[in-house]
């Protein structure tokens, strides 16, 4: 069945090339209408999958997709327009353009942590660029997967957009097809598998991966403000966010005050007692028992190497629960500092000089994001020039994801390619070079054989004067 759908989409993609932009706009509007119609169903599905709070579903799942649709509809005619570019003197008389064209049929593999938003945001870019798409939602969020299927079935013909539900075997089957482009969001380990499969068909890829995103708080930062922003960014979705602060460096001169502010922020958000935090309607659960157990093991292993939990630490894997946890004194070689945590655990370390932090970051794979709380222009310049990351945010965390004018993506181990807004349109498009020759092209015959003395002199002058 999947192969049949894929082949039908191959044919439909060719038809779409000849359609006007109105067809793309209508498709985006159909998707928008279906999402609006099923808002409560989306909220209910995410609640069932991992007790995601309604506010977080609205803020981080539904709103970004609707915003992406609105932005694409508003700007599509400008993005899709061919762009005139200069032509060198040696090609005098010709005109040159760059024309964006649809890649064709795209495979979109979505993760479980933001299962709705990270399925549909890439789809908006794919549709805006004129492509067909097969979506593969995560099998771990089966209720959300069902509503994704329902919405797309209402909004699209399967020859245009189709949702393939199933487990790893479904993904493996899809990866065997010769897609024109593959967009994957998930772990670095699986990203390598996807890239290997894409290479067999020379398909282009976008890999939105993860990694350990560092956060720096220096002595000039507003501590109370920084603590609240970091607490929100780290513990929204119970820490299951690819751009969440993964570990924290605090200047040693302000560490004690900062820790007080950080604890106060967590108590304000989720409750002062362990039981209040567990019962908080504003704190999500882990996606599975295995993920919960993994987080518990990370804490236990860090503590066995002399780390100290100074807030939280409660973990009940059988209930898919891991409470907001702050830990200090971690060994850089412990698993908690080697693996992406992807949960509500925040290691806190100290530093004396910013150069120490820069060295620490640069010794490790390039992160998806880097956050720095500072009012020191010197520190800003050093971090910006001397580190590499997918995104860099000063005096806040995570919110760069919400700016459609900024490309969102990683570097090397944290990903390749980027999307959102125009960057998503470009990612799902091929930039076709077009040159239109005029009758003056006859002058180029001076370069054709036989290579007479006159032609050789002309060629040498061409090089000599860099024409």
Image (spheres, helix red, strand yellow):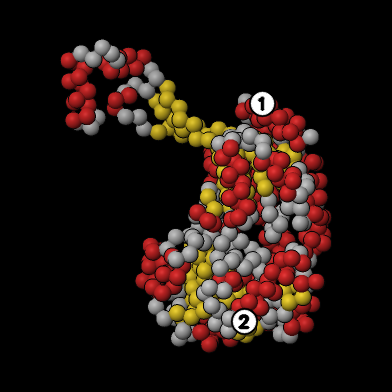
Q: Residue at x 22, y 26 (%)?
A: 462
What residue is shown at x 61% (from left), y 78% (from top)? 302
Viewer-closest of 53 and 259: 259
- Give me the residue at 66% from left, 69% from top: 343
Is 5 situated above or below 117? above
Count residues near mark 2 (Cα–Cα under 10 Å), then give few for <14, some for 14-19, many for 20+.
few
Q: Earlier in the sequence, mark 2 or mark 1?
A: 1
Q: Is residue 251 visible?
A: yes
Q: Which mark is residue 375?
A: none
Label 2 vs label 1, nearer the camera:
2
**Occupied quadrant, residue 46:** bottom right
On the picture, is 210 further left or further right than 249? right
Left or right placement of residue 434 versus residue 297 in this view:
left
Q: Position of residue 299 (x, y in %)?
A: 65, 77
Q: Secondary structure at mark 1?
A: helix
Q: Quarter of the image containing the C terminus?
A: top left
In the rendered view, tell whether residue 394 sits above or below residue 81.
below
Q: How far is the residue under mark 2 from the one under mark 1?
A: 62 Å
- All told, the count of numbered labels is 2
Q: Are marks 2 and 1 in contact (CB under 8 Å)?
A: no
Using the image as rendered, state which of residue 173 and residue 103 is in the foreground.
173
Please name the residue that numbered disc 1 is placed on: 15
Q: What label sits on residue 304 in the rendered view?
A: 2
Is residue 25 visible in the rendered image? The answer is no
Give residue 212's position: percent from left, percent from top. 55, 65
Q: Secondary structure at mark 2?
A: helix
Q: From the top left corner, tell me how far across and down residue 18 is, in percent.
A: 62, 25
Which residue is most to the top?
450
């Amino acid at each position: 069945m999947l192969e049949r759908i894929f082949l039908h989409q191959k044919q439909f993609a060719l038809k779409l090339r000849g359609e006007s932009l109105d067809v793309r706009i209508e498709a985006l509007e159909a998707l928008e209408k279906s999402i609006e119609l099923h808002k409560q169903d989306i909220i209910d599905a995410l609640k069932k999958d991992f007790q995601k709070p309604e506010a977080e579903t609205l803020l981080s799942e539904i709103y970004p997709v609707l915003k992406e649709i609105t932005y694409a509809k508003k700007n599509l005619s400008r993005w899709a327009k061919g762009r005139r570019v200069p032509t060198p003197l040696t090609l005098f008389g010709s005109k040159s353009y760059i024309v964006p064209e649809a890649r064709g049929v795209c495979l979109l593999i979505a993760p479980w942590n933001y299962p709705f938003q990270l399925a549909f945001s890439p789809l908006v870019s794919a549709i805006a660029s004129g492509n067909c798409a097969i979506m593969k939602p995560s099998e771990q969020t089966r209720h959300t997967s069902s509503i994704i299927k329902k919405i797309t079935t209402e909004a699209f013909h399967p020859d245009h957009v189709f949702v393939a539900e199933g487990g790893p075997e479904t993904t493996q089957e899809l990866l065997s097809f010769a897609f024109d482009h593959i967009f994957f969001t998930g772990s670095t380990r699986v990203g390598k598998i996807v890239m290997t499969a894409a290479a067999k068909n020379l398909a282009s890829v976008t890999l939105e991966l993860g990694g350990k995103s560092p956060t720096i708080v220096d002595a000039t930062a507003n501590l109370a403000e920084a603590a609240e922003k970091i607490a929100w960014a780290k513990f929204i979705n119970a820490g299951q966010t690819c751009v969440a602060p993964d570990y924290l460096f605090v200047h040693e001169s302000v560490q004690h005050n900062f820790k007080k502010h950080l604890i106060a922020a967590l108590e304000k958000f989720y409750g002062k007692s362990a039981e209040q935090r567990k019962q908080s309607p504003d704190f999500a659960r882990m996606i599975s028992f295995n993920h919960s157990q993994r987080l518990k093991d990370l804490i236990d292993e860090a503590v066995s190497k002399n780390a100290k939990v100074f807030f939280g630490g409660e973990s009940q894997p059988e209930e898919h629960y891991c409470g907001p946890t702050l830990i200090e004194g971690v060994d850089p070689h412990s698993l908690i500092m080697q693996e992406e945590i992807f949960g509500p655990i925040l290691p806190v370390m100290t530093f004396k000089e910013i150069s120490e932090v820069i060295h620490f970051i640069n010794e490790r794979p390039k992160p998806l994001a880097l956050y720095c709380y500072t009012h020191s222009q010197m520190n800003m310049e050093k971090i910006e020039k001397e580190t590499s990351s997918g995104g860099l945010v000063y005096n806040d965390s995570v919110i760069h994801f919400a700016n459609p004018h900024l490309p969102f993506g990683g570097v090397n181990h944290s990903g390749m390619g980027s999307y959102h807004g125009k960057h998503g349109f470009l990612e799902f498009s091929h930039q076709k070079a077009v040159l239109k020759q005029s009758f003056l092209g006859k002058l180029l015959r001076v370069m054709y054989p036989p290579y007479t003395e006159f032609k050789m002199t002309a060629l040498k002058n061409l090089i000599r004067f860099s024409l």
